[in-house]
Amino acid sequence: MKLSTLLLYTTLLLVGFSAADPNAVLLGSAPPQKKYSDRVVQATQATWDWMNYALHLSGLASCVGFQGIQTPFTCESFCADYPGMELIAEFGPRDVVDFSVSGFFAVDHSRKEIWHIFRGTVSLTDGISDVRLDTLPFDAWGPNHANCSDCQAHAGFLQSYNLAYAQFEKNMTDTFKKYPDYSLKVTGHSMGGAASFIHGINMKTRGYDPYVVASGQPLVGNQALADYNDRLFFGDKPDFLRQDSGRRYWRLTHKGDLVPQIPFWSPFQQPGGEIYIDYVLSDPPLDSLKVCDGQDNPNCNYSSNMVNSAITGTLLWAHFQYFVVFTLCGVNYWSTHIHG
């Protein structure tokens, strides 16, 4: 990817995410105080392995809308690393005025898993969607599915997700019926991380039990929405440091990546569940992966700021350097296999 192109995408991310003014949400009552903690523990090997597996699959979403993913499951990137995977469907904008998020559904028969994977911001259409300021209600799925009356959500992200959901809902329900004993895994990066966050709430409130890995996720909603997600995935007394088999939500952040802090102002708030990569490149070593308590842990992503990122030279690259390099289809393959 050319530096000028990367700079354009980064500008779209920073401008798009920060341009969402507080009026571009569903208004509710005053939110409670955020959950603060500075506790951090070392990630286990099992947590590292799971993040690595999910993020490499997430990287394949960059093929959607470009070279594409072909059946049964082939692409210009590392699709061949998943021999048990079957492509169910791709989804994304149908024309230039369709601002739905892109991605694909696949089934891994060897692991008995259904994967819903959302693509990050890699096009002008995605960037335009990020800056849409019209108001949309969070309870678009109906009060029986999203019972959070005080929840506020970024209108651009919510609209992008709802448009995509209308497009893939039938494929989704058909797949659930066909493979009722398969577990559900949801992942996405950047704008795809925002969609994964919303989709996780949607699936959880519909009675499914999704595993959600959202990387480089910008702030999607207010304090009430962050707390609602915490209750859904961690219970009334959330233990964000847990790493057992019962955990279902991971919000992955990276050293120097400022997107998880955007928009900078109220009412936007991140949920808990942060996993922090304290490493400047992709393919992080185990000892750099941290499990963070609280919602805005000062020892995790919130230790990064614009000045530090500029000084260390990570301002442009940090958002794309996770376990895999999030760039164009095929580029992440060579980046990962050269540096990994």
Image (spheres, grey):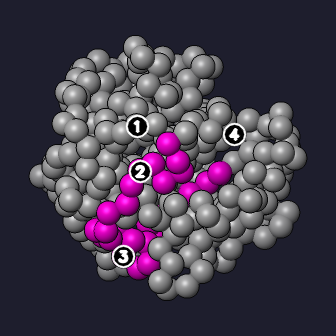
Q: Quadrant of the N terminus?
A: bottom left
Percent position (x, y) of residue 82?
77, 50
Give SS at disc 1.
Answer: loop
Residue count near mark 2 (Cα–Cα under 10 Å), binned few <14, some 14–19, many ≥20 = many
Give SS at disc 3.
Answer: helix
Determine contact: label 3, label 2, CB under 8 Å: no
Marks 3, 2: nearer the viewer? 2
The label on residue 148 is 1
Percent position (x, y) of residue 212?
55, 39
Residue that protrudes farthest toward the bottom in the picture: 96
Left or right of residue 32, residue 340 in this image = right
Q: Earlier in the sequence, mark 1 or mark 2?
A: 2
Answer whether residue 307 is visible to the viewer in this image: yes
Left or right of residue 300, residue 161 in this image = right
Name the amino acid type tagged 1: Cys
Determine contact: label 4, label 3, CB under 8 Å: no
| Residue hosting label 2 | 138
Residue that protrudes farthest toward the front in the picture: 143
